[in-house]
Amino acid sequence: MSTAAGTGSGKSAAAWRNWAGNVTARPVREVTPASVDELTAALRQAREDGLKVKPVGTGHSFTAAAVTDGLLIRPELLTGIRRIDREAGTVTVEAGTPLKRLNAALAREGLSLTNMGDIMEQTVSGATSTGTHGTGRDSASISAQIKALELVTADGTVLTCSEKENPEVFAAARLGLGALGVISAITFAVEPVFFLTAREEPMTFDKVTSEFDALYAENEHFEFYWFPHTGNCTTKRNNRSTGPADPPGRVSAFVEDEVLSNGLFQVVNTIGRAVPAAIPGIARISSKALSARTYTDIPYKVFTSPRRVRFMEMEYAVPRAALVETLRELKAMVERSNLRISFPVEVRTAPADDITLSTASGRESAYIAVHMYRGTPYQAYFTAAERIFTAHEGRPHWGKIHTRDAAYFAQAYPRFAEFTELRDRLDPDRMFDNAYLRRVLGD
């Protein structure tokens, strides 16, 4: 496998696969640039050679957003912190920096992101370009925490974008799907590190849905998991705390996060894949396996957790006011079907933001994520779930499985045309195009 940098002169590359294993790319060439100059040179060479170009992160998207048969750009050498501006409350990082390395580096500096998703394996540019989010009453997605970014366009121009500089590009490129150019650096808002106290406890489906508005209003970060074939949920409330740190004990953390959430979960899903009829019984046991616990730690240690069991996922954002009705319809659909679902359904929220193609653009949103164990047929479940989500004006997560196209998105996003017009200006020859983008953005 070539790792040629800068000139784009790498030879034929090996196939690339995503984390879930459902997407494969076979580029003719790949490069691993170590600087913006090398990235720019690689794009110019690809342009001369008539190659399509896609940057790729760690492959945690389930869609083919990063697939190319041309030049694949790997970000491994575009990593690290460029600068920290404590007065402005920002950190500028290279685009290929993994979130886990950024979180650890910020903690050493006494700093933190305000909110984040539940895993941190992704690169910062991959996570933001597809709209990765956590849950929050007031604090939004990782993309919404961007204060500036550096974008290399199809002709090799390096654009610095912020609310004041190239604001129309900034509005779109914070969640750009890789359609506008290759991000080379991102400036995030950060704040002095703080403590979060997490309270995890079981709750019935009826109780969590009937009290959802209050649970949402009373907690800075509220989420819950419903176990299909049961009336059981697990809830998690994260709120700021004065500390001190009181993390889960080593034994408790190992049992909850590794044995139950990963090891045992892997076993029961394997059994469920082999014997689907056993799944409802397994679900009733699994839904009661995790006990109530409370712990306090710095943000990334509370927001994120290991995810070693591989799966397929679909997630839709619906208007927050429509969440309970949507979820009840999903539960009713599962109960009257022959489906056997071994993975819990995850529910989170986000405030409205101003990013052109953010799933929370212009409206308070709630997210419903459905999963199936990798290797298990998922199409019937996802198709039925998607029918419910779209009936409630749902917007699919850009990095997760869905069947929507540009005609749907033109109705779902009031500013959709704003994004496609910008794409026409920045990439008129569609150097960053692929089949996924043609489907979701049009040609």
Image: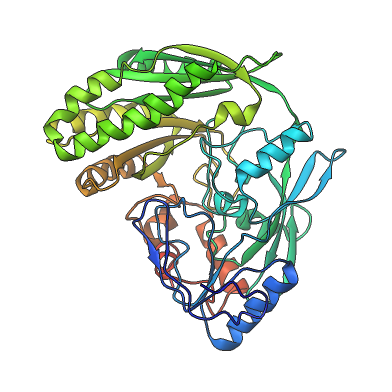
Residue 10, relative to residue 346: is it above or below? below
Q: Could you tell me residue 113's position as x and y percent?
A: 68, 36
Residue 339, relative to residue 232: is it above or below? below
Q: Quick check: 184 left or right of 134?
A: right
Q: Could you tell me residue 204's position as x and y percent?
A: 32, 14
Residue at the right extreme, as displayed? 87
Determine if residue 315 is in view: yes
Residue 377, relative to residue 71: is it above or below? above
Q: Could you tell me residue 362's position as x and y percent?
A: 55, 42
Q: Quadrant of residue 169?
A: bottom right
Q: Quadrant of residue 67?
A: bottom left
Determine if residue 136 is in view: no
Q: Which residue is rendered at x = 69% and y = 55% of the image?
A: 79
Quarter of the rendering occupied by the C terminus: bottom left
Q: Which residue is rendered at x = 48% and y = 74% of the image?
A: 13
Q: In which quarter of the image is residue 115?
A: top right
Number of marks present in the image shown: 0
Residue in the foreground of this view, choosing between 289 and 194: 289
Q: Could you tell me residue 172's position as x and y percent?
A: 61, 57
Residue at the front extreme, as displayed? 251
